[in-house]
Amino acid sequence: MLTPLFERIGTHVLRIFDQAGDFAVISGRAIAAVPRRPFDPQNLAKQFLAVGVNSIPVVLLTSLAVSMVFAVQLAYGFKQFQAEGLAAQVNGLAIVRELAPVITGLMMAGRVGSAMAAELGTMQVTEQIDALECLATDPVHYLFVPRLLASALMLPLLTAFSIWIGYWGGYFLLVGVEGQSATIYASDFYKLLATRDLGIALTKGFVFGVIIALVGCWRGYRTRGGAEGVGNAPTSSVVTSSLWILISDFFLTKLLLV
Amino acid sequence: MNDTAPVIDVVNLSKAFGPKVVLSNVNLQVREGESLVVLGGSGTGKTVLLRNIMGLLEPDSGHVAIEGKIVHQLDREGLFEVRKAIGMCFQMAALFDSMTVFENVAFALRRHTGMTEAEIVDRVDECLSMVGMKGTQALKPAELSGGMKRRVGFARAIALKPRILLFDEPTTGLDPVMTDVIGRIILDLKHELGVTSITITHDLKSAFEIADRIALIFRGECIACEPPDAFKQNPNPVVQQFLRGDADGPFLQDPPPPKRALARVVHNPLQLL
Ligand SMILES: Nc1ncnc2c1ncn2[C@@H]1O[C@H](COP(=O)(O)OP(=O)(O)O)[C@@H](O)[C@H]1O
Ligand SMILES: [Mg+2]
């Protein structure tokens, strides 16, 4: 009676291992291809623009919204203990260590990771990736490397930008709305932080950037089944990379803080 | 026909996807400068044959040798060297749609030759003229019709001056006039470049014009491979039905049941679950 159930579970487990193995192999090939020639500055510039510059508005709006909402809750929460002065400190801690990198990572998974999956997926089902192979060009080198570099280098920068926006979001709420002192906010924001916290934030951004590019490109590269496959690739890449961003965030926090 | 070693040597090639056998024991030899036309119904594995020749798929058994090198045994570098000598024209052209026509044709020149930009511009112009697409450099693939895309695809394939050209259904889905235009371009390329070629087509008229030999693939096997005149006289009812373009006959009938259905090879254990 139970055999079909076990078979179903078995199929899923096997498929997960199969895909994980394939992802590891392709990722390894992509990372190994980074220093390989020929370099492609034109493509790289295009990806820097797509991943970095064009993402500024999204990061700006989400960081502003999240930091302000968070400041509202902190102000309310600490008011219950007559400890409003702590709001700015905790706000700074949360933004730098967690909110800025994770929000940026999740937004970029949705914005650039899915675009990579859709673009490579379309190229796969229209045989453009085969055409690359036939023109003696390794698609993993040609397509993955510029996206990986752009994502890995731009995510830390966008995270830093998000921290800066978060600072001003909290400022607007705590100083502008709650009427706290501007000078105290400026020093309190950093009170619980050390320089290495910025390093942690940027490291997280880097790791998330690598995850986003590799998952997005891999999912697109492995697209099968015409238009439906191309439709599934971005969704699945966003879910997968968001999951890995959250999981790796936990471990990075644990590892880097001790 | 001379006695030199074949440029393209397909030996006992078999390929299945899971339980579905696509090619079984296909043997084809193409000699230098020869033009082989491969006929066959839709979904009989003609594209799979070309993909095996290009090393995009690995055969289950048998092998393909290009100029004496066994394709699936080469490492990446070796495979790329072989591919530089082959121009592949895809069924739907497979142009890079983020690039212009010029960038498409120049792609391999930029990556694999030390040509200067001026030399590349000249070579792209030359290739586009050869396929009657002069002056379209600045267009994007989305602005081209199906026949124009195929021709740009040809130009991209000949840019590196390959010794071998592979055409995958270059005329399917085109109007009769464009079909003839493409047929003539292939003939011109054959005469001007003296390449060895394999052309897959459904268009019998251009097939007989282009071919030095014609092969017919039926149920995964190559059931005929001979010069056009002999092909026309081939007594095999499948060949005759294909030539007549008739719906009645063995061509569309269900294949006989597999002899050893239980002993079929399972390539992917997941299929059993
Ligand atoms: N990558 C693949 N995976 C599974 N099946 C495939 C694959 N490529 C081709 N096939 C199957 O092989 C058969 C032959 O395909 P193809 O060579 O494209 O036919 P055609 O002769 O029309 O070019 C088709 O039935 C197709 O479903
Ligand atoms: Mg085909």
Image: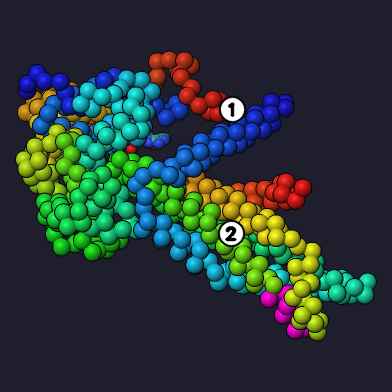
Q: Which mark is residue B253?
A: none
Q: Toward the viewer: A137 or A96?
A: A96
Judged from the image, the secondary structure of the residue bearing numbered disc 2 is helix
User: Which residues fall within the magenta stretch?
Assistant: A168-177
Q: Which residue is mark 1?
A: B273
In front of the other: label 2 or label 1? 2
Q: Tell which subunit mark 2 falls on.
A: A
Q: Amino acid at mark 2?
A: Pro
Given the current orientation, which residue lies at the most extreme right position? A81
Q: Residues within 10 Å of mark 2 (few under 14, many from 20)?
A: many
Q: Quadrant of residue B125?
A: bottom left
Whether residue B200 is visible: no
Q: Is residue B240 left or right of residue A72?
A: left
The amino acid marked with disc number 1 is Leu
- In this picture, residue A208 sits left or right of residue A251: left
Q: Are marks 2 and 1 on the same chain?
A: no
Say whether mark 2 is within 8 Å of ligand 1.
no
Q: Quadrant of the N terminus of chain B?
A: top left
Q: Which residue is mark 2?
A: A156
Residue, far front: A195
- Which residue is at 19% across, 47% downward? B159
Determine the image quadrant of residue B87.
Answer: top left
Q: Residues within 10 Å of mark 1 (few under 14, many from 20)?
A: few
Give the secondary structure at mark 1. loop
- Counting from the top left corner in percent of width and height, residue A63 is at 65, 69
Q: CA distance from mark 2 to mark 1?
A: 44 Å
Above or below: residue A51 compared with residue B252: below
Q: Quadrant of residue A81?
A: bottom right
Q: Nearer the viewer, residue A193 or A46?
A: A193
Q: Residue at x 85, y 74 (%)?
A: A85
Q: Which quadrant does ligand 1 occupy? A: top left
Q: Chain of mark 1?
A: B
